Image (spheres, grey):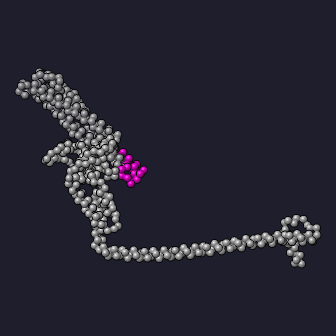
Amino acid sequence: MKKFLLLFALALLTPAVSAQPADLDALLRDIREVRNTEQTAMRERETRFLAERDEQQSRLRQAEEALAQVQAEADRLKSEFDRQEQALTEGEAQLAQRSGNLGELFGVVRQAADDTRSQWQDSLLNMQFPGRTATLDQLAGSRQIPTVEALESFWFLLQQDMTASGKISRFMAPVVGLDGSQRELSVIRVGPFVALQGEDYLLYQPEPERLLVATRQPEGRGLVDDFMQPRNELADLKVDPTRGNVIQQLQQTPSLTERIHQGGVVGYVIIALGLLGLLLALVRLVWLQRTSGRVSRQVADLGDLRRDNPLGRVLGVIGNHPRLEQLETLELKLDEAILKETPALERWQGLIKLVAAVAPLLGLLGTVTGMIATFQAITLFGTGDPKLMAGGISQALITTVLGLIVAIPLLFMHGLVAARSKALIQLLEQQSAGLMALHLGGEDEEDV
């Protein structure tokens, strides 16, 4: 029964048997063939499995052997590292014990070399003695005790700097002119303070190791030409005691024209109004001065009334022999004549005063616009770079200064013009009143 069931199951699993055999013998033969085929395939799979198992075991043994070798090498390296570290510790202890005070000397030398390098970084003497800072860099960055030769070299550099600082010497150096061209020129060095080429002061640029003609020269350049002349006595020369810092600041200081440009449109308007007000005041002062001279000549000669001055025109209203019965009419005519001359004497005074009052207001306007520009720069770029806010602040301050510079002189000019015109008007009233009193008293003009 079991054998029959086995044969039936094999028959179901065999895909090759698609049709029912004719008899049991044929079925038995088919089953045997299938069984032989499956047994052959099983033996082949078993053979491959065994071969792969042996290969994996061989690889495992090789990996274990390699791991053992690496572990042994790691143990050996760790042991060697510990030995070297112990030897290094013993060597450092022995070095510290043997160096003694030399270790402190080494620290002092390194610190002195580092401080000297910081001082000489922007020194003008580097142009005449190139490469000396490299020696200081090597000495400051060394981790070993300096040798006697290194100490002597350091001492020589210090002595060389002290000696050169007290001398005036001439040497060849690359100089960049105002046109941007670089040439080898003869340069005169006055200690570590200034370098001269011709009549020009030079600026030292440490990074490219060259000299640059200063765009803005200090005052007293005529002393340079006199200083260059051969002589036995002393000569005057302006030097920079800060070793170039003052000349550097001079390059960054804006000129008068640049400061005016910083004021912007508002600054130009203030200057234009100031020039207009000043021109009007000067014209009025000249005219009043000429008028005052003519009036003075008329006062000296009241018998000959002329029409080229206000006094002559006013007195000419009543003539030399007025009628005393028309006294009230004469007084009215004199008042009318004085009132007629007053506008000409006070002409443009209101405009001058207006300009003097508007100039500070325009300065305040420029201040407000400059602060607005400053706040816009802060909004866009923050407060990290103050240079971005310098334009607005400059405009705010320059316009305020320009407004005050225009307003203050114009106020004085207005006061002077008003005083001159008022003095002439008072003179007209005084002479008119005196003439009326003269005629009323019956006195002659010569007794006035």
Q: Nearer the viewer, residue 263 or 46?
A: 46
Residue at 32% in and 76% down: 97
Q: Relative to 21, does residue 432 appear above or below in the rendering?
A: above
Q: Nearer the viewer, residue 263 or 257?
A: 257
Report if residue 398 lies within the magenta region: no
Q: Residue furthest bottom?
A: 1
Residue at 16% in and 30% down: 292
Identify the magenta region.
Answer: 369-388
Q: Main secondary structure of the magenta part?
A: helix
Q: Position of residue 70 (x, y in %)?
A: 54, 73
Q: Which quadrant of the figure has residue 279?
A: top left
Report if residue 372 lies within the magenta region: yes
| Number of dots carrying numbers | 0
Q: Is residue 152 visible?
A: yes
| Quarter of the picture holding the N terminus | bottom right
Q: Position of residue 206 (x, y in %)?
A: 32, 52
Residue at 90% in and 65% down: 19
Q: Residue furthest right?
A: 23
Q: Relative to 64, does residue 254 appear above or below in the rendering?
A: above
Q: Relative to 448, does residue 121 appear above or below in the rendering?
A: below
